[in-house]
Amino acid sequence: MFTLSFTCAHLNDLFSQELADTNHSGQETEDNHKYHWEDELEVQDVCNVNISEDGVYSLRGTVGMNTDFLYKISKMTIISVSLCSGQELQFAVSNQLLNSIKQTKDVNRQYIHIELKDNEPFVNPIPGVYIANHDMPNELFSNVTD
């Protein structure tokens, strides 16, 4: 049993490592951030983690009062997490959004760090799920209002 630390970071294409190295000992500054934002999620009591780089994510939900939907979204990196209690959960990212994925481990913790490209628009329907706009079912966009 271990703890999974999942981090998803949205890259800032305007970040300059050269500027950081030259003027700030390699560190980010207020006007030179590497990431626009970072989501950090932690899951305890994990027994197993599996990463599938070309998986299918099942997006489920409800539109309106009683209309349930289920859409299968392909070309996703799926991180399946098995809890020791028997429950299963998933993190998912459209492959075209991925800049990098890194895994590290220590005695009681596994770390997964994902970097998302800056130039690809996406939606984040629930924590830990990042879907490129063009991968989203058009039917769901028809229910969006400004």
Image: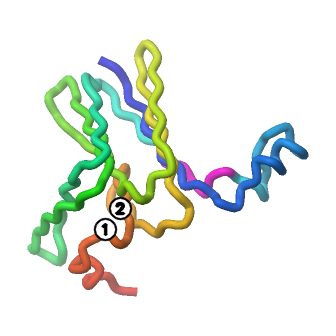
Q: Which mark is residue 105?
A: none
The quadrant the N terminus occupies is top left
Quadrant that contains the C terminus: bottom left
Q: Residues within 10 Å of mark 2 (few under 14, many from 20)?
A: many
Is residue 50 part of the magenta span, yes or no?
no
The number of numbered badges drawn on the structure is 2
- Residue depicted at 14% across the width and 76% down the height: 65
Query: Horizontal placement of 63 versus 122: left or right?
Result: left
Quarter location, residue 24: top right
Above-or-below relation of 55 to 136: above
Badge 2 is on which residue?
131
Residue linked to disc 1? 135
Tell me the quarter of the picture where residue 48 sits. top left
What is the CA distance from the residue labelled 2 to the residue labelled 1? Answer: 6 Å
Q: How dense is the environment of label 1, judged by Cα within 10 Å: few (below 14), some, or many (20 and up)?
A: some
**Left or right: residue 41 compared with residue 84:** right
Q: Residue furthest top?
A: 107
User: Where residue 51 appears, x then y in whole percent?
Assistant: 30, 37
Q: Main secondary structure of the magenta part?
A: strand
Callout 1: helix, strand or loop? helix
Residue type, numbered disc 2: Ile
Q: Is residue 144 left or right of residue 98?
A: left
Residue under the image location 24 percent in, 73 percent down: 137
Q: Which amino acid, mark 1?
A: Asp
- In this rendering, the answer to whether 118 lies above or below 108 is below
Q: Nearer the viewer, mark 2 or mark 1?
A: 1
Q: Nearer the viewer, residue 53 or 129?
A: 53
Q: Are marks 2 and 1 in contact (CB under 8 Å)?
A: yes
Query: Range of the magenta residues?
Result: 34-39
**Residue shown at the point (17%, 61%) measured from the top left:** 72
| Front residue of this view, candidates 99 and 59 | 99
Q: Position of residue 33 (x, y in %)?
A: 71, 53
